[in-house]
């Protein structure tokens, strides 16, 4: 993952002021076009998926492209891969480029696995001899075994993807473009894929990874670019970029939450949620060992009879549930809810791993129906001393027992 | 290719090789001719893939059917039977044309090459959209693959035609057999050029594929396949109308093909300077094909977003 020592790394991808415009047409058939001819402008809408993107990549880097849905990262990947032409600006690459935008894109269901391997290898730029020389390796990596001579339409989706990935990684690319395809296959195969990617990194291949998994970026990349509405919002080492990405997601979440509040009706609702470490102010990082206070404001127009309870759940930035409890589990009877009320849940001696966490709160009635949900109603970040990743914090001490 | 086992070494080698490789600007705009030449080179470099795609089309077409490739004969033979019985004998078109069956089959074979290429090429980009949206390839390969698979079917039909012509005694060895070559070339040049443009246009406007079907039906009846050229001459006279009718490249190819595979003794009448006309049509076709490729290159930049 680190730069090679001694060998200077040449630029392999140079993206210069690239912009990509999509025209959204609302008339599609000949008739509609003839009818709207002359006043065509009204039936078109421009959308700039990319605008003024400039960066260059040195050989051997693994770069993560991140951004929320529609931020232009997949478009950028397609422009680098030569699948889309930029409207403005230029993209230059050197060496063999392999794009893993969709595994098995060239597979034909009626052909056998073997025929498809040769066809797909050829599509990805291998000659027949090269494909034949690597066939055994591909077969072994895919784990398809004797099914290789069966038509691929009879394959399970897992087999299909395994074979496709096996072909793609055996094409000896200098630049590998990967678009969210690593989340396929069973766990063992995913391991294998990640190992292969690490091997590629060791061999000085350049990898451009588009992903929504910020964890994957931290784990695999040595640089990350955050795209926001088609421009580069950050181009930095992964930790810093991921932090910026989280802030962007947070902004969006706040906007959505505000919309939701405005639209709410008169029933029981969660009016406010705040979270902070006891003795610290809101937005200050939470340190291991801190007590965490979650203060929930409730409000209702009509009264809610006894039997209802509150659910509180803490998610990691990747959406994984880290902690969850309800007042029912805790044996707390909240009585009837009328007017306005504030409650506090204190979690003592917390030890969250570094990162950002989100608090979800729900009002649930007797039978378990959710009356009101405040998803990601509040968030907190924990301190990060750089010694570890994950959702649990612990003091690490390393000892070599045989020394 | 034997990659060195040591990753650090592999890395150093890769960097060294990359240093030597020039940065290539994707889709760079240079002069039209130079660019066409470069794209042609790209396609030639991927000819192996072209072969595989053609084979894929052919293999997949009849996979799972009991008669398989026989179906590619059954269609033209049925057509032949219908035209022979209905047009030839009920409508009595056969009277003025000796060896009517061979005559019709000649026309159907060469026209089949044209129509199969055109209808295959027109839909080739749309039906391969899975690949086009995901992988960077010279996209001309897909319409060209339709030309290839049509050529294969044409080859089989041609064999049948030759056998039939020998059996009926209509095949005579001589220089006139060579007429078949310009006939095939002219058809290929036009079919490839038109196929390129139409395949690209079909991406933007799906109506194109239906227009192509109609146009092919018109062309079938606008060439002397089921009737003879002299019948047209009789109706249109020797004026400019006949010239327009005759200089349709498909008509010229059909005439040349019939000349090749029919006994020259039967004395069928053909327009003068057939070879010269074919040569001109071929030259015009090449220029059109060049512009077709330019148009294709211009349109293909936004295929991935339009599909």
Image: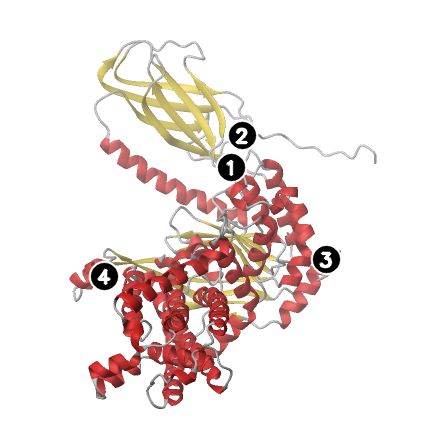
SS at badge 1: loop
Q: Secondary structure at mark 4?
A: helix
Q: Earlier in the sequence, mark 4 or mark 2?
A: 4
Q: CA distance from mark 1 to mark 2?
A: 8 Å
Q: Which mark is residue A30?
A: 4
Write the residue at 67% across / 58% down: A132
Identity of the residue drawn at 66% across and 61% down: A130
Q: Residue B101: in sight, yes or no?
A: yes
Crowding at dot 1, Cα within 10 Å, few <14 / some 14-19 / many 20+, comes out as many
Which one is closest to the eye, mark 3 or mark 1?
3
Q: Quadrant of the C terminus of chain B?
A: bottom left
Q: Mark 4, chain letter?
A: A
**How is the protein colored in the picture?**
secondary structure
Contact between labelled residues 1 and 3, with CB atoms less than 8 Å apart: no
Front-most of A2 and A341?
A2
Q: Which residue is mark 3?
A: B8
Q: Are marks 3 and 2 in contact (CB under 8 Å)?
A: no
Is label 1 in contact with label 2 (beta carbons under 8 Å)? Answer: yes
The x, y position of residue B209, in whole percent, is 32, 61
Would you say residue B35 is visible in this rendering?
no
Q: Residues within 10 Å of mark 3 (few under 14, many from 20)?
A: some
Q: Is residue A184 left or right of residue A329?
A: right
- Circle 1 sits on which residue? A355
- Sort mark 4 into few (<14), some (14-19) or many (20+) by Cα contacts within 10 Å: some
Badge 2 density bin: few <14, some 14–19, many ≥20, Cα 10 Å: many
Question: Could you tell me residue A123's position as x and y percent?
Answer: 54, 60
| Residue topped by disc 2 | A352
């Amino acid at each position: 993952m680190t730069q090679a020592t001694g060998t200077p790394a040449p630029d392999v991808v140079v993206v210069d002021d690239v912009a990509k415009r999509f025209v959204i047409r609302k008339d599609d058939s000949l008739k509609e076009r003839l009818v709207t001819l002359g006043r065509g402008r009204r039936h078109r809408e421009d959308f700039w998926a990319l605008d003024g993107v400039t960066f260059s990549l040195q050989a051997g880097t693994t770069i993560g492209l991140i951004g929320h849905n529609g931020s232009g990262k997949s478009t950028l990947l397609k422009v680098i891969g030569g699948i889309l032409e930029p409207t403005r600006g230029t993209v230059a690459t050197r060496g063999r480029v392999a794009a893993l935008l969709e595994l098995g894109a060239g597979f034909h269901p009626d052909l056998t696995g073997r025929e498809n391997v040769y066809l797909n290898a050829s599509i990805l730029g291998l000659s027949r001899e090269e494909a034949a020389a690597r066939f055994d390796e591909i077969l072994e990596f895919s784990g398809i075994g004797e099914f290789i001579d069966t038509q691929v339409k009879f394959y399970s989706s897992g087999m299909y993807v395994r074979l496709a990935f096996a072909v793609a990684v055996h094409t000896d690319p200098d630049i590998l473009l990967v678009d969210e395809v690593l989340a396929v296959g069973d766990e063992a195969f995913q391991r294998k894929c990640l190992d292969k990617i690490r091997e590629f990194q060791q061999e000085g291949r350049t990898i451009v990874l588009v992903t929504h998994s910020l964890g994957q970026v931290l784990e695999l990349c040595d640089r990350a670019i955050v795209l926001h509405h088609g421009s580069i919002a950050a181009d930095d080492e992964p930790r810093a970029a991921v932090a910026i990405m989280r802030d962007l997601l947070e902004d969006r979440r706040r906007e959505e939450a505000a919309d939701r509040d405005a639209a709410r009706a008169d029933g029981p609702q969660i009016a406010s949620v705040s979270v902070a470490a006891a003795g610290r102010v809101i937005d200050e990082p939470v340190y291991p060992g801190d007590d965490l206070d979650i203060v929930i404001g409730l409000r209702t127009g009509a009264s809610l009879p006894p039997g209802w309870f509150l659910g509180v759940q803490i998610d990691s930035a990747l959406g994984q549930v880290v902690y969850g409890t309800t007042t029912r589990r805790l044996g707390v009877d909240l009585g009837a809810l009328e007017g306005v009320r504030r409650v506090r849940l204190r979690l003592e001696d917390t030890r969250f791993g570094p990162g950002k966490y989100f608090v979800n709160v729900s009002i649930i009635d007797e039978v378990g129906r959710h009356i009101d949900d405040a998803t990601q109603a509040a968030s907190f970040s924990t301190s990060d001393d750089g010694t570890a990743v994950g959702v649990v914090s612990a003091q690490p001490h390393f000892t070599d027992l045989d020394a | 290719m034997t990659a060195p086992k040591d990753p650090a070494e592999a890395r150093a080698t890769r960097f060294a090789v990359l240093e030597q490789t020039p940065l290539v600007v994707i889709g760079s705009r240079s002069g039209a001719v130079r660019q066409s030449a470069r794209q042609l080179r790209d396609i030639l470099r991927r000819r192996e893939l072209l072969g595989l795609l053609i084979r894929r089309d052919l293999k997949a077409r009849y996979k799972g059917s009991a008669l398989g490739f026989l179906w590619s004969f059954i269609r033209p033979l049925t057509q032949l039977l219908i035209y022979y019985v209905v047009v030839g004998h009920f409508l009595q078109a056969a009277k003025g044309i000796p060896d009517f069956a061979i005559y019709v089959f000649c026309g159907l074979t060469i026209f089949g090459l044209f129509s199969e290429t055109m209808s295959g090429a027109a839909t080739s980009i749309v039906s391969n959209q899975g690949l086009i949206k995901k992988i960077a390839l010279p996209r001309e390969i897909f319409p060209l693959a339709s030309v290839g698979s049509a050529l294969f079917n044409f080859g089989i039909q041609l064999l049948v035609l030759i056998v039939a012509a020998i059996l009926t005694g209509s095949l005579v060895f001589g220089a006139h057999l060579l007429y078949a070559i310009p006939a095939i070339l002219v058809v290929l040049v036009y079919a490839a050029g038109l196929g390129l443009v139409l395949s690209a246009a079909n991406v933007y406007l799906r109506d194109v594929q239906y227009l192509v079907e109609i146009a092919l039906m018109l062309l079938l009846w606008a060439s002397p396949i089921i009737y003879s050229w002299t019948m047209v001459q009789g109706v249109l006279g020797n004026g400019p109308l006949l010239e327009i009718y005759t200089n349709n490249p498909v008509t010229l190819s059909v005439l040349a093909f019939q000349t090749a595979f029919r006994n020259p003794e039967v004395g069928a009448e053909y327009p003068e300077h057939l070879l010269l006309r074919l040569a001109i049509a071929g030259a015009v076709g090449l220029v059109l094909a060049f512009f077709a490729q330019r148009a294709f290159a211009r349109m293909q930049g936004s295929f991935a977003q339009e599909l």
